[in-house]
Amino acid sequence: MKTALTIAGSDSGGGAGIQADLKAFSANGVYGMSVITAVTAQNTVEVRSVQDIDTDIIRDQIEAVFDDIQVDAVKIGMLSKPETIEVVIEGLKKYKPSFIVLDPVMVSKGGHHLLQPEAVEKLKELLPLATVITPNIPEAEVLTGLTITNLDDMKKACEKIYELGVKTVLLKGGHLNSEPNDLFYDGQTFHLIEGKRFYTKNTHGTGCTLSAAIAANLAKGMSLLDAVQKAKCYISVAIEHSLDLGHGHGPTHHFYQLYKKELAFNE
Ligand SMILES: Nc1ncnc2c1ncn2[C@@H]1O[C@H](COP(=O)(O)OP(=O)(O)OP(=O)(O)O)[C@@H](O)[C@H]1O
Ligand SMILES: Cc1ncc(CO)c(N)n1
């Protein structure tokens, strides 16, 4: 069986972070493993508190996994602070996994900083190691200093992020008022990854789910563009059937059967 590893934060509410990633890995048919960088006390409404995990045990988790088990793809989510980013960079340089999907998680839907603002410069050092980076609009604005309000702006931001040394960029358009179309850029060609908006408040963990599904697809041997397109299909179904749990933004629904039907319909 193919495998994927998530290096990310834990969400006690189960909708984002490590929990979303492991659910998405399972639903997409790969064996999931985890390196926990931070524990958040979180639900569908808010992040109440965060405890960063000591860098020694982050390093130990990375080494315990890679020393023993084949890792076919890595997904990176919440990294919290510069020291955490540094230890993750060291681990990736040591074990050189074939595929790295970097979700540059910065702020939760409720406005809680999941990455210290002063860690953004350190995060940029991780970019050259990534196969693909998957920023949302606000994250791309932080990385580029640009204001992004339409497709033209998205193109400029992709080019600017590409110049930071990353191999490919998937800029998610979910935060714009238009259809949730994402833009994929490999340094030469733009591909519009089209979506249809579902009018639901239950969008907790959508970014985590998308990036984990991309990692799972890469682990299974898909080409990058195919992995992105199929993951977009997965997240669309997961949002369409998202769950009305809790009092805030409910989670996406990781239900393989629903996704399978949609994929078969599209092919
Ligand atoms: N209401 C929606 N209907 C359909 N697709 C959506 C909707 N909102 C977002 N998407 C899509 O979901 C994916 C995740 O994008 P989004 O911009 O929400 O990520 P994010 O902000 O990083 O999420 P989070 O921080 O909650 O994990 C993208 O492909 C985006 O286009
Ligand atoms: C742990 C964690 N990672 C990522 C996100 C972004 O959705 C979140 N809310 N919580």
Image (cartoon, rainbow, N blue to C red):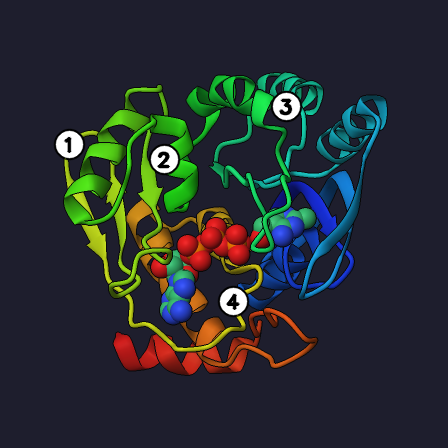
Residue at x 75%, y 28% (from the top left corner): 67
State the CA–CA distance, disc 3 to disc 2: 20 Å
**Which badge, 3 or 4, is on the more N-terminal residue?**
3
Instruction: Kindly check if marks 1 and 2 are in contact, taking CB atoms under 8 A apart as contact.
Output: no
| Residue hosting label 1 | 188
Residue 45 coordinates in the image, percent (x, y)? 67, 64
| Residue hosting label 2 | 141
State the CA–CA distance, disc 3 to disc 1: 29 Å
State the CA–CA distance, disc 3 to disc 4: 27 Å
State the CA–CA distance, disc 4 to disc 2: 21 Å
State left or right for residue 117 relative to residue 214: right
**Which badge, 3 or 2, is on the more N-terminal residue?**
3
- Which labelled disc corresponds to residue 203? 4
- Which labelled disc corresponds to residue 172? none
Q: Note whether 14 is above or below 124 in the view shown.
A: below
State the CA–CA distance, disc 1 to disc 2: 21 Å
Quarter holding residue 5: top right
Disc 4 residue crowd, few under 14, some 14–19, many 20+, Cα 10 Å: many
